[in-house]
Image (tube, rainbow, N blue to C red):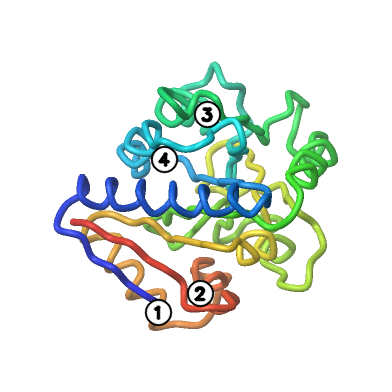
């Protein structure tokens, strides 16, 4: 694991915006698909707003989600809504957006369509951002999740998986571990002393069923890039 600490959250957001724009710009320059997968929650909003003004060919960038609550964009719990309100603004409004919520009654019923949407992005993700909960979940890999084993199966072929868990609230849909660790750049973005302590606890154990972030750390083909600010 490669842990980078920043003096404050504004400095972290600005640095991530520059690095992400550079990575997307490089992909566009080589003619490769430029794809960005982001997580929800309150942590990335400042980063999203910083990135939204980056000067690059946003029309060549496809944005999607690492995971999503199975709710429409009209819900304030929607990650798609968060992304549209904070990232897909300013210059970034020209990017295309691929949501995971399909409008079906359940993530299981919408699974095939969501899987095809991710397949249509073509190739590995350029940049993917993870968050982490106080229980050690990341993406929608929740302890006790009904499809956790499938979602973190390193040999699995599925691109997305449904997830129901007590701590998840709503039913969820998530990119699977193989999709995430195949990203050219994979970053875990955490903030606050409490999240640093959660990460330290995760590093001290091995069972991914207890703290699923461990599955990402163990399976990543290179040291996981972790960024943190107090």
For disc 4, the marked residue is 41
For disc 1, the marked residue is 203
Q: In the drawing, does residue 130 fall left or right of residue 184?
A: left
For disc 2, the marked residue is 217
Q: Secondary structure at mark 4?
A: loop
- Say which of 100 and 225 sits in front: 225
Q: How far, Cα to Cα, is label 2 from label 4? A: 21 Å
Q: Residue at x 52, y 62 (%)?
A: 185
Residue 12 vs 41, above or below: the answer is below
Q: Residue at x 69, y 65 (%)?
A: 178
For disc 3, the marked residue is 78
Q: In the drawing, does residue 100 fall left or right of residue 122?
A: left
Q: In the drawing, does residue 72 fall left or right of residue 47?
A: right
Q: Secondary structure at mark 2?
A: helix
Of the two numbered discs 2 and 1 on the same chain, state the one appearing first in sequence: 1
Q: How far, Cα to Cα, is label 1 from label 4? A: 23 Å
Q: Are marks 2 and 1 in contact (CB under 8 Å)?
A: yes
| Badge 3: residue crowd in 10 Å (few <14, some 14–19, many ≥20) | some
Q: Residue at x 29, y 68 (%)?
A: 4
Residue 23 appears at what percent x and percent y? 49, 54
Residue 35 appears at what percent x and percent y? 61, 46
Q: Secondary structure at mark 1?
A: helix
Residue 165 appears at what percent x and percent y? 59, 49
Residue 92 vs 124, above or below: the answer is above
Image quadrant containing the C terminus: bottom left
| Badge 2: residue crowd in 10 Å (few <14, some 14–19, many ≥20) | some
């Amino acid at each position: 694991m490669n842990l980078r600490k920043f003096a404050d959250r504004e400095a972290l957001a600005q640095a991530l915006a520059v690095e992400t724009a550079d990575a997307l710009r490089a992909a566009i320059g080589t003619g490769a698909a430029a794809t960005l997968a982001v997580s929800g929650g309150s942590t990335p909003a400042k980063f999203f707003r910083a990135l939204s003004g980056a000067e690059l060919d946003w029309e060549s960038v496809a944005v999607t989600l690492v995971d999503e609550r199975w709710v429409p964009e009209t819900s304030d719990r929607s990650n798609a809504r968060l992304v549209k309100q904070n990232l897909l603004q300013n210059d970034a409004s020209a990017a295309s957006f691929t949501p995971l919520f399909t409008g079906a009654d359940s993530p299981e019923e919408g699974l095939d369509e969501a899987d095809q949407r991710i397949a249509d992005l073509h190739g590995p993700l350029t940049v993917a951002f993870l968050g982490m909960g106080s229980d050690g979940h990341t993406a929608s890999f929740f302890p006790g999740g009904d499809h956790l084993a499938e979602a973190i199966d390193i040999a699995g072929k599925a691109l997305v998986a449904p997830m129901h868990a007590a701590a998840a609230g709503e039913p969820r849909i998530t990119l699977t571990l193989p999709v995430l660790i195949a990203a050219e750049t994979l970053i875990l973005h955490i903030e606050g002393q409490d999240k640093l302590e959660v990460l330290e606890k995760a590093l001290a154990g091995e069972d991914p069923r207890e703290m699923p972030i461990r599955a990402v750390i163990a399976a990543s083909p290179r040291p996981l890039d972790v960024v943190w600010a107090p």
